[in-house]
Image (cartoon, helix red, strand yellow):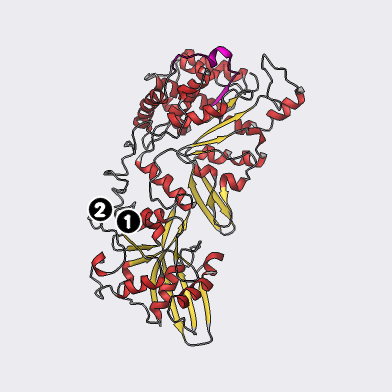
Amino acid sequence: MFAQVYGLAINGLQAHLIRVEVDVSNGLPDFSIVGLPNTAVREARERVRSAIKNSGFDFPLQRITVNLAPADLKKDGSGLDLPIAIGILAATGQCSTPSLDQLVFVGELSLEGQLRPVPGILAMAVSLAKDSKYNLIVPPENLSEAKLIEEIKCGASPYLSELVAAINQMPHSADSSLSPSHSNLDFHDNPLFSASNIENSISVHTGFSINSITNNSTFLQQPNSSSDFIDISTIKGQLQAKRALEIAAAGGHNIILVGPPGSGKTLLAKAYAGILPPLTRSESLEVTKIYSIAGLLGHNGHLITNRPFRQPHHSATAVGILGGGRDLKPGELILANHGVLFLDELPEFSRDVLESLRQPLEDRELTITRQRGSVRYPARLSIVASMNPCPCGWYGDGNRPCTCTPRQIHNYRNRISGPLLDRFDLHIEVPRVEFEELHDISPGESSATVQKRVLKAREIQWTRLGESRTNAEMSAQETAQHCSLDPLGQELLRRTFKQLNLSARSHDRILRLSRTIADLEGEKDIEPRHLAEALQYRALDPAT
């Protein structure tokens, strides 16, 4: 007796359709699963056996072989419990088979036969939208997330017994269209199901109309409509740091803040997220997929419309920051994709963790490779780091003496290697806030005002580079093409390059930063004043 059903498995941000082939034959009772299953999939044998029995069905005392195809793709997670159980019931004649070629099953099974939620449903729904013939069956807690993609029909049932009963009520004609009138399943119908094409448009159910997710210039919310971020106007003083944050936000540059305790570094970092442009449609979908795969989306079924802000503790491990582990899950770096990763007290992080950031900061993507395979995640984010000027925190402060020796200061700063420091385009000193500044009642610029200028600069970059790219993402060839200097600027850069003993990477990053400053002013060419401002944001270079 043979049956074939369909499930889904996650690899990185992509979901793959899995053919679950079940053969029940005579022989000594045995239950084996082949096709590169991981531990969670192999353990499905016990969950499926108990779920079938406790749902009132007969579990065959025969030889059961389950093949997960394609066999060369590693299968992770417990989401294949449900298709394996349906396959066994279909192979033994307890579940109707004519409708199974239109259904894709995802869900973990409890021992009593209840369907439990699994991560990554949004990525699975996106992959199924490429072929409108499939209908997705998920646990009830995952249904609202699956409904975000309107190109597919999706249904849910809380128990295995109810699901099988609903399938048995479906029409036996292979040409019949599944709908709520054919079964007790809670199917999500949409007229776009048979007409839309995932390659051209993905309509997302958010409570308002979205015509095309490939239109990257359209935002999911009005600028500065989120109340989750600190308004930059509430931060007293620190005009230079605020200007640097605006430049960093406009060009997607990484920034490091250096100052004594209590100077406002953390507040500035949290305000930074509020002046970034809102997420576009495609960015929102990608961020939501990442959080879904990580199991952090919850069951409310809403798209993430605010840029992520992640602040890991300095004791975090490399796996916690980058990701990995048994299931190759995304870490803090990936969870901050299209948002901000704030590394407070940067020198306190492990040296291995800091050095592991170099490659993803340069390539804007991260490949995690382990014995079981490799996955690739996007890493298009901005890093905001902060640090004290010395171990005690008061080096260079005019009011409190520093108690550190020169060697202690040298060792403290050397925890951040030169190659890593090269990847920060702005090094900003954040001095102590004076009493008069704290009691200044004059209103400062709001985050909304700053964000408008950032948006204008970003639009210039999108016109120049396309695909929602920023100046910080320019290649060496693009830097040479778009960041040319006049003779006066070339001479200024030449002298500074020799005086500060800059690397070629720093040279290019200074040019890109100058380009961003010019974009903020709406200038076509980089003027010497733009370059001079970019050069002053190098507080941690050796010669300064």
The percent coordinates of residue 391 (x first, y second) are: 71, 28
Q: Compute the Cα span from label 2 to label 1.
A: 9 Å
Element carrying mark 1: loop
The reply to whether dot 2 and dot 1 touch (C-beta < 8 Å) is yes
**Around disc 1, counting alpha carbons within 10 Å, would you say few (fewer than 14), some (14 to 19), or many (20 or more)?**
many
Question: Which of the pair 50/535 is nearer the observer?
Answer: 50
Q: Quadrant of residue 276?
A: top left
- Pointer 1 residue: 129
Q: Identify the residue shown where x is 52% and y is 67%.
A: 41
Where the N terminus falls, by quadrant? bottom left
The magenta segment? 424-443
Question: Which of the pair 86/372 is nearer the observer?
Answer: 86
Q: Is residue 202 magenta?
A: no
Q: Is residue 143 visible?
A: yes
Indicate which disc residue 502 carries: none
Q: Is residue 38 visible?
A: no
Q: Is residue 437 magenta?
A: yes
The percent coordinates of residue 102 (x first, y second) are: 31, 67
The amino acid pointed to by label 1 is Ala
Element carrying mark 2: loop
- Up the image or down, 257 lies above or below 293; here it is above
Q: Identify the residue shown where x is 39% and y is 60%.
A: 140
Which of the two discs, 2 and 1, labels the residue nearer the N terminus?
A: 1
Overall secondary structure of the magenta section: loop
The percent coordinates of residue 334 (x first, y second) are: 51, 44
Q: Identify the residue shown where x is 62% and y is 17%.
A: 499
Q: Is residue 443 left or right of residue 213?
A: right
- Pointer 2 residue: 196
Q: Identify the residue shown where x is 59% and y is 22%.
A: 263
